[in-house]
Image (spheres, helix red, strand yellow):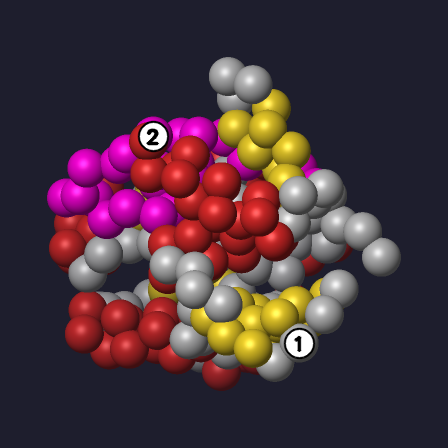
Amino acid sequence: MNRLLILEDDRLLNETLEDFLEEEGYNIKIALDPYSALELTYQNRFDLYLFDVNLPYESGFSLLQKLRDSGDMTPTIFLTSRDDKSSMIEGFNIGCDDYMKKPIDLDELHLRIKALLRRQIRSNIIEFNSYTIDCNAKKLYFKGKLLSVTTKAIELLLLLIISKGEVVSIEEIEDRLWHVNENASLGSIRVYITTLKKYFPTNIENIRGIGYRFIATE
């Protein structure tokens, strides 16, 4: 499940976006000011940011500049009431990926989100140690041979890999692998880990009581 951060100081619009996108199957975190949003980026890994531009304390432009300067390349859409061309140019120069003027058409926003996530800066194919992962099709191959691994197990493998050696908590795994109206299963996670360890016995480490991490090897 893709995780989105919404930064919008208009509480009603914030709640409208949250409700709509949760119904579309996204895991949503919200913030009403840039400081709270920045804190959330430290605590979580997001697949996409939705940032208002005119905000208390500092602009969405300023916040994104800080994130880009720190190496955070998470795809970002600015939502703004500004209609001047210079603001749009500034947003793209800072590093946003899309720019929508208010009032926001929710269906159009969803189409843009899906398009950005498809183009997200990750290779559609991951290859290492004779294994190939097709990220779009959620399939795992060894030396070109398709392996019998469930979609959710591959989603878990991808989550561990993109975390780049950081520990992924059980709670985050549950949030990512199950829809909001689905019941997460710790037992299922253990089954997926057991399956993956058959292929990556030295790469997946169990951090007891916390979660798992993937250690890359040559």
Q: Give the image location of residue 172, x and y in percent.
A: 43, 36
**Residue 143 has which mark?**
1
Residue 168 is covered by the magenta coloring: yes
Pointer 1 and pointer 2: residues touching (CB < 8 Å)? Answer: no
User: Where does residue 164 sit, x and y in percent of width and height?
Assistant: 69, 48
In the rendered image, which quarter contains the C terminus? Answer: bottom right
Q: Residue at x 16, y 49 (%)?
A: 19
- Which quarter of the figure has residue 78? bottom left
Residue stretch rendered in magenta on the structure: 165-186
* Residue highlighted by disc 2: 186
Depth order, front residue of 40/132: 132
Mark 1 or 2, nearer chain start: 1
Give whichever of 28, 1 is nearer the camera. 1
- Which tag is nearer the camera, tag 1 or tag 2? 1
153 and 39: which is toward the camera: 153
Asked if residue 102 can be seen in this view, the reply is yes
- Could you give the CA–CA distance between mark 1 and mark 2, rounded to whole angstroms? 31 Å
Q: How many marks?
A: 2
Q: Residue furthest right?
A: 218
Q: Residue at x 34, y 30 (%)?
A: 186
Tag 1: amino acid? Lys
Taking the spot 57% from the left edge, 33% from the top edge, the residue there is 212
Residue closest to the far top:
209
Q: Secondary structure at mark 2?
A: helix
Q: Is residue 33 magenta?
A: no
Residue drawn at (44%, 30%), measured in percent from left and top?
Answer: 170
Q: Can you give x and y, in whole percent of width and height, for residue 76 in the image?
A: 49, 64
